[in-house]
Image (tube, rainbow, N blue to C red):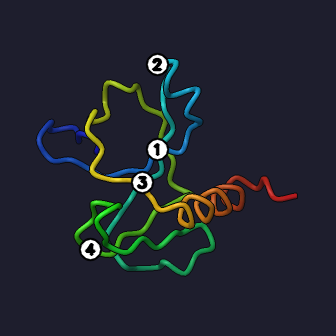
């Protein structure tokens, strides 16, 4: 979860940078997560359904084209959940599309 500029409301995101980078204490790359179901037919969107593993209460969308680089101190140290393996693989594919790394 990411704090917003007012310091109170929080935004959800998926950490997409490599674990080795994250463990090294460097800035992390996150993809924004939203619950707004509009214009989600882009091939850079991953639909994540609510389930215990994800920690989500409603269907959400990983926006693989909406990336941020942040210091780790901006992230909540207690993740709300994690993506199932199939959604991790799908996120990797959508990131490759969004960054034009298909080959």
Look at mark 1 in the image and give the residue it sits on. Answer: 15
Marks 1 and 2 sit apart, C-alpha to C-alpha, by 13 Å
- Nearer the viewer's eye, disc 4 or disc 3? 4
Marks 4 and 3 sit apart, C-alpha to C-alpha, by 15 Å
- Nearer the viewer's eye, disc 3 or disc 1? 1
Q: Which quarter of the image is occupied by the C terminus?
A: bottom right
Q: Position of residue 74 (x, y in %)?
A: 31, 30
Residue at (14, 38) in percent of width and height: 6
Furthest residue toward right: 103
Q: Residues within 10 Å of mark 1 (few under 14, many from 20)?
A: many
Say which label, 3 or 1, has the lower sequence index: 1
Look at mark 2 in the image and give the residue it sits on. Answer: 25
Look at mark 3 in the image and give the residue it sits on. Answer: 32
Q: Quadrant of residue 2?
A: top left
**From the viewer's perspective, is 76 left or right of 6?**
right
Say which label, 1 or 2, has the lower sequence index: 1
Marks 1 and 4 sit apart, C-alpha to C-alpha, by 19 Å
Q: Which quarter of the image is occupied by the N terminus?
A: top left
Tag 1, which secondary structure?
strand
Marks 3 and 1 sit apart, C-alpha to C-alpha, by 9 Å
Q: Position of residue 60 (x, y in %)?
A: 36, 70
Say which label, 1 or 4, has the lower sequence index: 1
Look at mark 4 in the image and give the residue it sits on. Answer: 58
Q: Quadrant of residue 32?
A: bottom left
- Nearer the viewer's eye, disc 2 or disc 3? 2
Classify 54 as above or below 24.
Answer: below
Marks 2 and 4 sit apart, C-alpha to C-alpha, by 31 Å
Task: Indicate which disc residue 73 carries.
Answer: none
Residue at (71, 56) in percent of width and height: 96
Q: Position of residue 27 (x, y in %)?
A: 48, 25
Tag 3, which secondary structure?
strand
């Amino acid at each position: 979860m990411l704090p917003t500029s007012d310091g109170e409301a929080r935004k959800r995101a998926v950490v997409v940078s490599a674990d080795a980078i994250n463990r090294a204490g460097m800035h992390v790359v996150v993809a924004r997560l939203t619950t707004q179901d509009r214009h989600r037919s882009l091939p850079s969107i991953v639909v994540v359904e609510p389930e215990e593993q994800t920690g989500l209460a409603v269907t959400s969308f990983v926006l693989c084209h909406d990336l941020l680089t942040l210091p780790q101190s901006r992230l909540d140290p207690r993740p709300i959940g994690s993506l199932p393996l199939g959604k991790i693989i799908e996120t990797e594919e959508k990131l490759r599309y969004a960054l034009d790394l298909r080959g």
